[in-house]
Image (cartoon, rainbow, N blue to C red):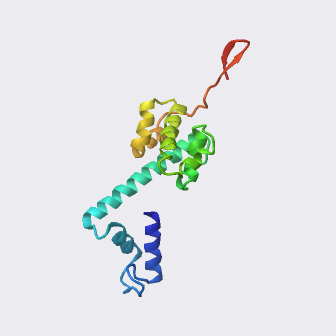
Amino acid sequence: MILMTAFCIWCAVEGRSIYSQGEADGNVSAGVAVFYVTYAQGGAAGAINVGIALFVVAAIALGQWMVFEKAGQPGWGALIPIYNFYLLVRISERPTWWLILYLIPIVNAIPLVLVPLAVARHFERSTLFGWGLILFGFVFYPILGFGSAQYSKPKYIRYHEGQPYVC
């Protein structure tokens, strides 16, 4: 969708027609072009869909921004594609190579489920809250980011002379 939007804006700025190789009639603004192509003349329903999509994206971005800052990572990383996955992997204490798993179809289900569950655990939230991050991130990331949850590094149990202790 982002690429389609960028293409439509480019077409409007360059004065090109979106559907043909010829020149545009000059009456198509960038906003109209984006709306027209993205939602195929959906009318009011298209406008509502755009509004809902913008709300969901903004809620997740703001929530992740605050989550990243609580975890000691740069908050602006929530706005950068792929880099925000990298930061989530770091917060969840998973190996960095898990970032590659996000790029492989079907296999990406593994980090898409396990990373938010680990993020919830590092903020001392339940597994059910982690499933909320997975399924309803636009609600649960702001709750995690703006709420009272504090990031805590995982505690590891070590053994010294047969006795367990927490590091």
Instruction: Look at the image and tell me whether residue 24 can be seen.
Output: yes
x and y, in percent, of residue 69 in the image: 57, 43
The front one of 164 and 77 is: 164
The front one of 105 and 150 is: 105
Q: Is residue 21 above or below residue 5?
A: below
Which quadrant of the view contains residue 55? bottom left
Residue found at the far right of this picture: 161
Quadrant placement of the C terminus: top right
Which residue does the image show at 55% across and 33% down from the upper left? 122
Quadrant placement of the N terminus: bottom left
x and y, in percent, of residue 30 in the image: 41, 75
Instruction: Look at the image and tell me whether residue 75 can be seen.
Output: no
Q: Is 40 situated left or right of 70 in this image?
A: left
The front one of 50 and 165 is: 165
Q: Is 120 situated left or right of 34 in this image?
A: right
Which residue does the image show at 47% across and 70% down from the upper left? 6
Which quadrant of the view contains residue 25? bottom left
Residue found at the far top of this picture: 162
How many marks the image carries: the answer is 0
Which residue does the image show at 50% across and 38% down from the upper left? 114
x and y, in percent, of residue 27 in the image: 36, 83
Q: Is residue 152 above or below residue 31?
A: above
